[in-house]
Each structure stands twice: as C-alpha cells, then as structure tokens.
Image (spheres, rainbow, N blue to C red):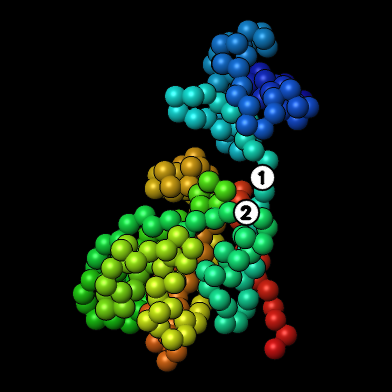
C-alpha cells in the first residue's frame, strides 16, 4: 500500500484539531511557520495542506489577515413550485422564515446589446437593460443575479431600488402578472466575478439557476441568470397537487 503523503498527514492533523474544537469556527489558525514548527515539517508542506483544506471549504484565507476556520455549512433549501410561483418574493420569504436577515443589494445597471438574451425575449436588435443584484444574508452574499429585460419597462432601476423588493418590486408595478416560462438548474465553476461577488474561491462549485419569465399575455419579458454559493443554497423542486 502506498504511503500517505506528508502533506496529507498534515492536512488530517489540522482537520482533526478543527473537529475536536482546538480551533473553533471563525478562529484564526496559527501561522504557517508556527504550524510547521509544531508539526515538525517544513512550511511548504503546511501550505499544501492548507490549500487542500481551503479547497474543501474547511478553512478560508482572508487577504492581509490570515487563515480562519470556516463557519459550519448552513445550506438553505429554496423551494421552487413546478407551477406559477411568486418569483423572488417566495425565496426571500423562505430566507426570512429561517430567522435570517437579508438585503436585495443593487450592484449595477447598464444598457447592453446582448444577442442571446434578446433572442430569448423575442425582441428586435437594440439594447436591453441588464441589472445585476445580490442577495445578502446575515451580512454574507449568498447569490447574485443578472437580469435582462426591455428598456421600456423601467426608466431608472437604480434610482427606484428597494433592498426589500429589489428588481421584482419595480417590475411588479408595471407588469400585471409575472409568470415563469421555464427554469433550469445546473452547476458551474466560480468565475473571477463570482469569486469577487460571492467571496468564494475561483473554480469552486456554484449553483446556477436560469429562467425566462413572461407577462400576463405570455410574452417573454425577463431573462435571469442567478449564481449561488453551493455551500449556502440548494434548490428543491416541489410538486403541487392542483
């Protein structure tokens, strides 16, 4: 049987110290040099072990501050009806029901000529609104979205933004009945933009929920891509007996 690599033994030793409470969630780990001295190995071995622990989400590095034990994973199952749903309001209601605080935070709005989004909205050539926002739960960003829709629906998304109702609060004022056409759920590797927005490592797994929404006449009016931390959110498709 092959011998266990030294960095793996160091990883297991640090993980055991986290499991037994020697290092508690949120606590800063000793420096690489201190760990190397305590464990009788060199700093490169400790660094490799720490990289593996960070990749697994057990610890996290904070630039200029050090390495900390990650908080326990608390994954919120967001339920999605397989029928006309209440869109984001249903999701935020579920977050609030768990005792969490949340904010729907405006990130940016710009006019773009996005061919694929325009095609899904069945619109002629010309710019659309793209609005980006984030759902911040208990101070941490759990998910962020990009939404594309016709320019004539809203004049000033940023100026009319509400941290409680976000984009849908504005759209519900001008569209009588927003209804889903389709939803698709997949997984992806976190991009640099995901890393900066969600506070996760680039390349780590995230959940992606794409969707197309129509108005009361079944005309497509909204295309959304939502990207969520996989260690904070899971999606549950719920069948309703109608």
Q: Is residue 208 above or below residue 48?
A: below
What kind of element bears circle 2?
loop
Looking at the image, residue 168 sits to the left or right of residue 231; the answer is: left
Question: Closer to the camera: disc 1 or disc 2?
Answer: 2
Which image quarter is the C terminus in? bottom right
Residue at 24% over, 65% down: 111
Residue at 44% over, 72% down: 169
- Residue 83, image x and y in percent? 60, 82
Q: Which residue is mark 1?
A: 73
Q: Is residue 188 above or below residue 55?
A: below
Residue 83 visible within the image: yes
Looking at the image, residue 230 sits to the left or right of residue 131; the answer is: right
Which image quarter is the N terminus in? top right
Dot 1, how many residues are within 10 Å of its Cα: few (below 14), some (14-19), or many (20+)?
Answer: few
Residue 8 visible within the image: no
Looking at the image, residue 162 sits to the left or right of residue 57; the answer is: left
Whether tag 1 and tag 2 are in contact, CB under 8 A, the answer is no
Looking at the picture, tell me which residue is in the foreground, 94 or 129: 94
What kind of element bears circle 1?
loop
Dot 2, how many residues are within 10 Å of its Cα: few (below 14), some (14-19), or many (20+)?
Answer: some
Residue at 43% over, 47% down: 197
The residues bearing labels 1 and 2 have C-alpha atoms spaced at a distance of 14 Å
| Residue located farthest toward the bottom when viewing the structure as drawn | 217
Residue 58 appears in which quarter of the rendering? top right
Residue at 74% over, 22% down: 22
Q: Which residue is mark 2?
A: 100
């Amino acid at each position: 049987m092959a011998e266990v690599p030294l960095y793996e033994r160091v990883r297991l030793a640090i993980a055991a110290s986290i499991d037994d409470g020697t290092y508690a969630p949120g606590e800063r780990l000793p420096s690489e040099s201190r760990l190397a001295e305590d464990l009788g190995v060199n700093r490169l071995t400790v660094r490799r072990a720490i990289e593996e622990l960070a990749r697994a989400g057990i610890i996290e590095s904070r630039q200029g501050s050090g390495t900390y034990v990650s908080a326990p994973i608390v994954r919120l199952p967001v339920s999605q009806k397989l029928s006309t749903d209440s869109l984001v309001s249903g999701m935020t209601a579920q977050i609030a029901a768990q005792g969490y605080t949340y904010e729907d935070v405006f990130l940016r709005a710009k006019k773009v000529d996005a061919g694929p989004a325009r095609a899904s909205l069945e619109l002629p050539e010309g710019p659309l609104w793209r609005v980006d926002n984030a759902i911040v739960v208990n101070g941490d960003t759990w998910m962020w979205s990009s939404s594309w829709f016709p320019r004539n629906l809203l004049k000033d998304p940023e100026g009319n933004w509400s941290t409680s109702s976000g984009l849908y609060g504005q759209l519900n004022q001008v569209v009588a009945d927003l209804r889903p056409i389709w939803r698709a759920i997949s997984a992806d590797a976190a991009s640099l933009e995901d890393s900066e927005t969600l506070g996760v490592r680039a390349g780590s797994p995230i959940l992606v929920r794409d969707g197309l929404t129509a108005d009361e006449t079944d005309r497509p009016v909204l295309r959304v891509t939502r990207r969520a931390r996989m260690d904070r959110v899971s999606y549950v498709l719920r069948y309703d007996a109608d």
